[in-house]
Amino acid sequence: MIDEHGNPNIDPARDVKSVPMGGATQVWCATSSRLAEMGGVFCVDCDIAPLMKEQSDQFSISENHTEGRDKGVAPYAIDPAAAAQLWSVSEQMTSVKFPT
């Protein structure tokens, strides 16, 4: 986000980050020894994201689009049954069988 003078408007508490801040988690994931031999984790702010409670108010976005939003991974996003179903549907839609 840029203000009216062309200056970056950086506020990490509201998820408004600089380009380096925005890319830091991806770099951390690619290089962190904590993630060696580990897959299928969701990361945020250079760490493994905590599991959020399944409550609709945690997923709501306020008028300014960031306030009140918890950082973490929703239970449905790491559900093995949902992942298997998505895999199956993807194979059907693409007519391609992928090794599991």
Image (spheres, rainbow, N blue to C red):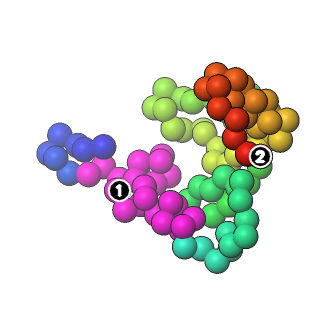
In percent of the image, x 71 and y 59: which residue is there? 39
Give the foreground label among 2 and 1.
2
Name the spot of residue 13 as percent of width and height, x first: 50, 52
Q: Name which residue type carries label 1.
A: Ser
Residue denoted by label 1:
18
Residue denoted by label 2:
100
Left or right? Give the position of 96 relative to 88: left
Dividing the picture into quadrants, the one containing residue 78 is top right
Identify which residue, 72 or 96, lies in the foreground: 96
Q: Would residue 10 be counted in the magenta stretch?
A: yes
Name the spot of residue 20 as percent of width and height, x first: 37, 62
> Which of the labelled discs sits on residue 57, or is there none?
none
Q: Earlier in the sequence, mark 2 or mark 1?
A: 1
Considering the numbered disc 1 on the image, is that residue within a helix, a strand or a loop? loop
Q: What is the crowding at mark 2: few (fewer than 14 residues within 10 Å), some, or many (at least 20)?
A: few
Identify which residue, 43 or 36, lies in the foreground: 36
In percent of the image, x 69 and y 29: which residue is there? 91
Residue 18 lies, with reference to residue 100, above or below; the image says below
Image quadrant containing the N terminus: top left
Name the spot of residue 46 as percent of width and height, x first: 57, 64
- Give the magenta range: 8-30
The secondary structure that dominates the magenta segment is: helix
Residue 62 lies, with reference to residue 8, above or below; the image says above
